[in-house]
Image (tube, helix red, strand yellow):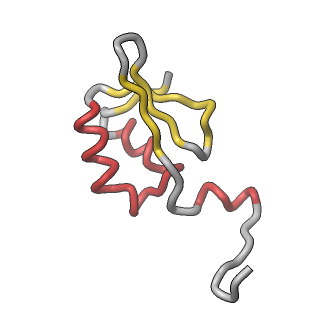
Amino acid sequence: MSENRIQISEENLDSVTGGNVQYVCTETERYAWGTHNPNVKYGYTSKRAMIKFIEENYDYYGEAGIFQALCQAGICFPL
């Protein structure tokens, strides 16, 4: 491990900004999820609005918080 990196515990992992948000958009499926918790899926009302919101707010909320913010904005909803 380099001198600039630290090891974080499992309970602090959700507070780290970064990660990966994925989405599926096919004729039969339409949902998004984050790699921090791949078992939780979210439906979305507009792919364009979701992507724009993520681009504008991801650095502020991080992967774990972006879905809560998307739901509060009415763009996503838990499945």
Residue at 60% in and 36% down: 38
- Residue most toward the bottom? 3
Out of 13 and 25, give the one closest to the viewer: 25
Out of 69 and 58, give the one closest to the viewer: 58
Q: Classify the position of the N terminus by image quarter.
A: bottom right
Q: Along the horizontal axis of the image, is 62 left or right of 13?
A: left
Locate residue 60, reporting x and y percent. 39, 62
Residue at 63% in and 85% down: 4
How many labels, in total?
0
Locate residue 11, reporting x and y percent. 73, 57
> From what the image shows, is residue 53 above or below residue 17?
above
Q: Along the horizontal axis of the image, is 11 left or right of 24?
A: right
> From what the image shows, is residue 11 above or below residue 35?
below
Locate residue 76, reporting x and y percent. 37, 32
Locate residue 51, reporting x and y percent. 30, 43
Residue at 50% in and 35% down: 33
- Give the quarter of the image for residue 57: bottom left
- Give the quarter of the image for residue 2: bottom right
Q: Along the horizontal axis of the image, is 77 left or right of 40?
A: left
Residue at 46% in and 39% down: 22
